[in-house]
Structures are given as C-alpha cells and as structure tokens.
Image (cartoon, rainbow, N blue to C red):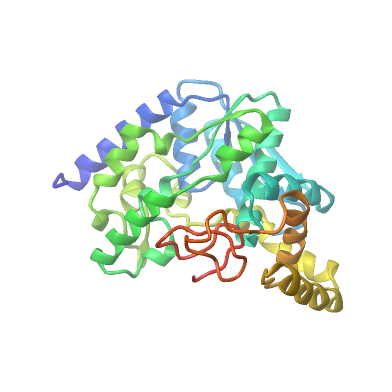
Amino acid sequence: MNNSIDEICLEVRLLSQEAVKRNSTEGILLSGGLDTSILATIASKSASLKAFTVALEGAPAPDVQYATLMASSLKLEHVVYYFKNDELCDAVRVVVKTMRSFDPMEIRNSIAVYIGLRVAKEHGMGTVMTGDGCDELFAGYSFLFDLEKEQLDLELRKLWDVMQFSSIKLAKALGIEVKLPYLDPGFKSFAMKIDSSYKVRDEKGMKWGKWIVRKAFESILPEEIVWRVKTPIECGSGTSTLPNLFNEKISDEEFKDKKCRYFDEDKVMIRDKEQLFYYEVYKSAIGVPHPADLKSRLCPECNSNVAEGATYCRTCGAYPI
C-alpha cells in the first residue's frame, strides 16, 4: 500500500465508521483505551449507547479513570461496576469451563470480560461491542515493537492465523451476542494490507504500536486517550492482583503437596498457587488434560495438543514451547 499517511488515515476512519455501522449494538465494554474509545466515539454519533467498565474492588484499575473521561466527553450513560473477591470464584468457574483453560493470564483477562458482559446483560443489553482485534491487526503488543520489519511481518501473520477472543465464547455462554467491528471483513482486510512500517513507529520519544490508528484519530479523541500506552485487560481492570490473593489463600505446604500430586497423578506441571486454583476448577469441570491426537504436537507441561508452530499452550499457558 503506497498511499500517503493522510490517505491511509482517512481510509482507517471511513472503514471503521462503516464497520461500526454494520456492527451496531446497544452497549460497549469501554476500557478507555484507544480501541474501545474509537468505537464509542463513532457509535455514539448515530445511536444511544450505554458503556460498561468493570474493576476489581480495592485494586489499582486505571481503566476506570480513562473510561470515565471518554464517557463524559461523549455524554454516554456509563455503568462502572466494582466486583468483589467473593464474586471471583463464580466467575472463575464459568471462565475456566467456557475457555477450557487454566492459563492464569487468559483467566485474569477473561474474568474482567465475563463480568463486563454479565453486567451489560443485567442492564438489558442483548448485544455488546468490544475492541477485540485492533492490537492484532495493528501491532499493538509491546513484544512486537523492536522486531526488524521482516520479522514483524512474520509475527503479525502468525497472530492473524491464531487470534481468538474470549468475548465471543463468554457472550455465548451468557446468552447474548458480542460484536467485534475491527474484525469486520472490510476493515480487517484493509488493516492487513497496511504496511507494518505504519503500525509500529516512533513518536514523542517512544515507540508505539497502532501508530497509524492513533494518527487517524489524533484530532478526534482526547490526547491522553490517543497516546495512552497499551494496558492489558488484567492491568486496566485490577485482576493483575489475583496472584497475591491466591498466595494468601493457599499455604506453601498445600501448594507443595498438590503440585507433586498433580504431576505424579495427572502429568500436569503446576507453576504457582494461582494456577493451582484454576487447575482444580478445570479438573473438576472438564477433567485431566489429555491429547485428542497422540500423533500431534503435545504441550510438555499438560499434555494437551498444541498447534504446529504455536509458541504457547492455550490450555495451561506454558511458554515458550
């Protein structure tokens, strides 16, 4: 794609508007990050939109501050819901069973998504919009920033081949529908064709992912939103503090005993107390992990099948493999 930066920015804006129009919803999970702020800004121009932000009570949760800024700027009805520790166990059970995973990072992120979708449903929403897909299409993850162009292009293609989003499965489990405008075929196809040199670039003394998207909406969104550093869901919602909760909940002796027992009996390697909790939920709901195909590649830590070329296990989170 040899268009000028201004031409690409214009196309990003036009195609994102069309994608949102084709994926209109009643509600949006609003994190106050770049991706959901763009969607909220576009959607709010043509429809009444209700925004939902969730955070773990008592934990640092910067999403609340940024989402409140955006909701106020757009004059959206905004529901901020603080979930308590005693809600986590129920959420964990649903997430582990639905995602068929006891990968701590997956669970931490998906808990916030699940509770956000659940709260939206409780407020009468039948369809909810999320910002899934933008990071994958536009190199939003920091591990991509320092790659040479050829390697960046390769890693992006790998991401596109394997990208999956928990919001789709969790919404289905709740009986509602989730819309992902960034994965709208027209927008997705265009995004994949944009040269990666426009996706990762230096600005303001830093290296940024999604650079072309930031430039496209630079004059439309508040500066602190446009240039907000990518924040994983677990950090933005406060669920990144869950390891501390399980470290207090499970004694060293119990962890040591169960770690040995599950390795001996199930051939599953448990890395920490948080994962132990999730594994016991997984084992109770799904059973001991086992390969569906013994001839295919296996995870060395849980014996689940993993895709050829995969660098981590979706079941237990083992990385690198």
Near-viewer residue (319 or 58): 319
Location of residue 281 (image quadrant): bottom right
Q: Residue furthest left?
A: 2
* Residue 249 vertical position relative to residue 29 in the rendered view, above or below: below
Q: Is residue 58 visible?
A: yes
**Residue 133, position in %: x, y?**
44, 45
**Residue 30, position in %: x, y?**
57, 40
* Residue 18 vertical position relative to residue 320 in the rendered view, above or below: above
Location of residue 176 (image quadrant): top right
For the point 73% across and 29% down, the residue is 122
Q: Residue furthest front?
A: 295
Q: Residue furthest top?
A: 47
Location of residue 20 (image quadrant): top left
Q: Is residue 52 left or right of residue 161?
A: right
* Residue 259 vertical position relative to residue 194 in the rendered view, above or below: below
**Residue 192, position in %: x, y?**
29, 46
Q: Is residue 201 visible?
A: no
